[in-house]
Amino acid sequence: MRDEKEPRCTVCRAGISVASKRGRPALYCSRSCQARAYRRRKQPPVPAPERPAPTSGARSRRRRQIAEAVWRIAAERGLDAASMREIAAEAGVSLRVVQYHFGSKHQLLVAALHMLHRENERLARTRVHYDPADLRGVLSSLLDEFLPLDAQRDRALRVFSAYYARSLTDPALAAVFLSDDHPLEDLVAGLITTAQESGQTAPGLDAGREADLLVAAAVGLGGDVLHGRRTLNDVRATLAYHLAKLFGPA
């Protein structure tokens, strides 16, 4: 019966006969096992299995989390403070996570801008209800979207102001932020045109010019509210005054 304390080969687990107790204990039963052990040590370690790629839902949530960090920094400190490291810290993620989802800072700023536009459009659809019999009321509600009437609209206006300021010195961002399209003005012009066709407005209006004036006035006056130069009541009264010129007395 083999002695359980007999040393065994670390490769094949065969017993090793001990001729002498002097020196280091033998680890291998033969030169062949010794060579096998040497080859094992030279082989690279087996890599750990890769983590599964995040699902589309998880990826969207992470991108939204990072974009919201951009919005907060832009609203509170301006886009000049929005470095990749600052954004990562604000979002509570690593810099590598930000780079993985957006690649470069320009790509991140552009994506965050588009996401904010989509968010504003989604919320505006819940607040502005189209009524063909009251297009003046529709326009009034639409112009309210340019005013800091609540925390969400206040932050959005601050973020857009930060993007505008940055676009003055960043041509690549300006090409995205200041596009040749004018969707807001076109929307307002379309509403005015529809109102003209249904006899709800004064005659002889240039719908495009009036839309430019209304949007510019709402955006500019909304900025005055952010700076504390005007009150919301004053601004809304000014916009109502101009709508009265288009539609007549309420």
Image (spheres, grey):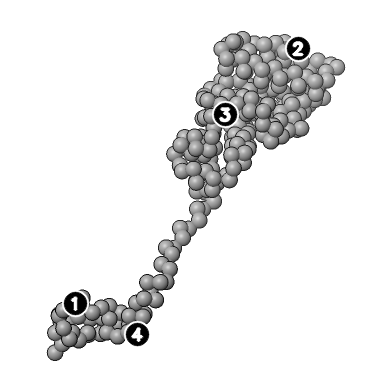
| Label 2 to label 4: alpha-carbon separation | 100 Å
Does residue 44 sit above or below 135 in this rendering?
below
Kind of residue at badge 4 = Ser
Residues at discs 2 and 3 in contact (Cβ within 8 Å)? no
Question: What kind of element bears circle 1?
Answer: loop
Residue 23, numbered circle? 1
Of circles 3 and 1, the one toward us is 1
Does residue 45 sit above or below 75 in this rendering?
below
Residue 235, image x, y percentages: 63, 13
Residue 102, numbered circle? none
**N-term-proximal mark, 2 vs 3:** 3
Where is mark 2, residue-wise?
A: 245
Where is mark 3, residue-wise?
A: 80
Residue 99, image x, y percentages: 54, 45
Residues at discs 3 and 1 in contact (Cβ within 8 Å)? no
**N-term-proximal mark, 1 vs 4:** 1
Residue 144, image x, y percentages: 63, 21
| Label 3 to label 1: alpha-carbon separation | 70 Å
